[in-house]
Amino acid sequence: MSRYIPTYSKLLVVSDTSMCQDKDNQYAFGPVVKELEALTAFKTIVWIGFNRGGIGQNKSLVQLKKGNIKLILLPSSGGHNVLHKAFVLLLYPLYCFVILKEVLSSKYIHVRAPSNPAVITMVLSWCFPTKKFWFKYAGNWVGEASWFYKCQRKLLKYLGANSKVTVNGNWENQSKHILAFENPCLNQTDRINGQHICEQKKMSDKINYCFVGGMNTNKGVDKIIEVLETMAKNDKFGTFHIVGGGELLEPLQLKAKTFSHKVVFHGFLAKDDICEVYEKCHYIVLPSKSEGFPKVIGEAMNYGCVPIVSDISCIGQYVQHNTNGLLIHPITTQQLQEQLMTSLFIEQKQFKTMMMYNYNLAEKFTYEYYEERIVNDIFN
C-alpha cells in the first residue's frame, strides 16, 4: 500500500456524535476527534453532530486542537419513551435542511451510522451520484439488532455506486461496495512504546488482568465480578484492574469487597493512564454480549495484553482461540471461568508467541493505516 497521501479540499462528516461549544473552544467525543485530527489528506473538515450539553456535563468530550475542523451543532434528540422518539421525527426537516446544505458544497462525505442523520444522508446519496459517500457502520453488521438498526443495515446494502460502506469484519455474500475496516486507536508513539513493553513483559508469579469499557451488563463486567466471587483463590492470580464508569460501578465495587481476589476499580481514565494499566497486565478480558470490534482490543494487543474475549461479531476473525488469545463461547460465567483458569497456566514461551502475534496485528489499528485505506480504498 502506497504511503503517498494526496490532498483534498474538504471532507463533510455527518454523525450523531456528541459535541458542544464553550466561548471560543470546540469540544466533541474524544475517539472521533482523534480520528479526524489524524487525517492529513483534507484541508478542511466540516463536522455535523449533536449539541449535548457543556464540557462539565460530559467527560467523554475533548477539546479540538486543529483549526481546520468546523463543528455544526444540531439540536439533540432521542430517548426511550414514545414522546421522545416522536420529537426526533419532528426535527427531521431541520436535520435534512442542514445536511443538504453542506452536501451541496462537498464532494467527499463521511457518514457515521447507525444514526438518524445517517438515514437522511443515505437518501441524499441517491440524489447526488457524482459525489462520493463513505458510510461507516459502527455496530454489529450481522445478528440481532433493533428494527431501526436492521433497517439501516438493509438500506446500506442497496446504496448506489457512489457509496462505500465500511463494517466490522468480512461476511459471506458481502457486496463489493461493503468493505471490512479497522477502527484506529494507535499512533506511532503507541507503537514504539508498545514494542518496548512487549519486549520486556513476561509471565510472573502473579498474573494480572484488566477490563476496559462501560460498566454495564452488555459489556459483561458483572460476569467478571460474579466469576471472581465464586472462583477459588489461586496463588498465581494477581490483580484485576477495571477501567470505566457506568451504572454498575458502585454496586460492583461494594460486591468486590466481600471476596479475597484483589480488584482495583479505576473509573474513567485518560488514554495515557489506560496504557499504564495495559503495561501492568498480561490479559484483557471482555465478555461482551454484543460488539462491533472494540478499539480497546487493538490498544491492549499493542501493549502486550493477550485478549480473553467473547466470540461474537467479527472478533473471532482477529482473535483465534489458543493462537493469539482465548475465546469465550458461549458467553456464560462457566465459560469465562474456564478461560481465566486456562490463562493462568499458559507458559512463558506460548504467551510470548501470542503477545508478539498481537503486536504485529495491531499495526492495522494505527491512524496511518486508517488514512491510507481512506485514500486508497474508499475515496480513490
Image (cartoon, grey):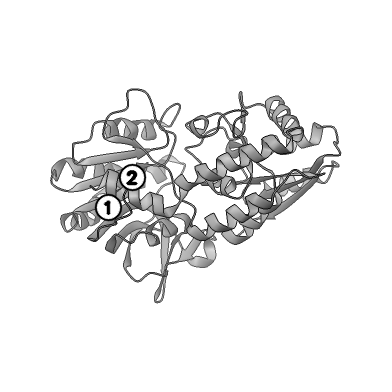
Distance Cα–Cα, label 1 vs label 2: 9 Å
Q: Crowding at label 1, few (<14), some or many (≥20) Cα neighbours within 10 Å? A: some
Viewed as shown, does residue 338 lie left or right of 97?
Answer: right
Kind of residue at disc 1 = Tyr
Q: Can residue 171 be spotted in the picture?
A: yes
Viewed as shown, does residue 329 lie left or right of 224?
Answer: left
Residue located at (49% from left, 54% from top): 186
Residue 228 found in image quarter: top right
Where is residue 135 drawn, in percent x and y?
A: 31, 43
Kind of residue at disc 2 = Asn
Numbered disc 1: secondary structure: helix
Question: Disc 1 vs disc 2: Cβ atoms closer than 8 Å?
Answer: yes
Return the residue at label 2. 116
Q: Can residue 89 be spotted in the picture?
A: no
Asked if residue 32 is positioned above or below residue 171 in the image, the reply reads: below
Nearest to N terminus: mark 1 or mark 2:
1
Q: Crowding at label 2, few (<14), some or many (≥20) Cα neighbours within 10 Å? A: some
Residue located at (49% from left, 58% from top): 188
Viewed as shown, does residue 370 lie left or right of 298?
Answer: left
Q: Please state which of residues 27 and 11 is positioned toward the viewer in this rendering.
A: 11
Number of labelled discs? 2
Where is residue 360 drawn, in percent x and y?
A: 52, 44
Where is residue 273 drawn, in percent x and y?
A: 63, 60
Return the residue at label 1. 95
Numbered disc 2: secondary structure: helix
Rendered image: mark on residue 129: none
Give the farthest residue toward the bottom: 24
Residue located at (53% from left, 55% from top): 191
Viewed as shown, does residue 214 lie left or right of 32?
Answer: right
Where is residue 351 drawn, in percent x and y?
A: 68, 38
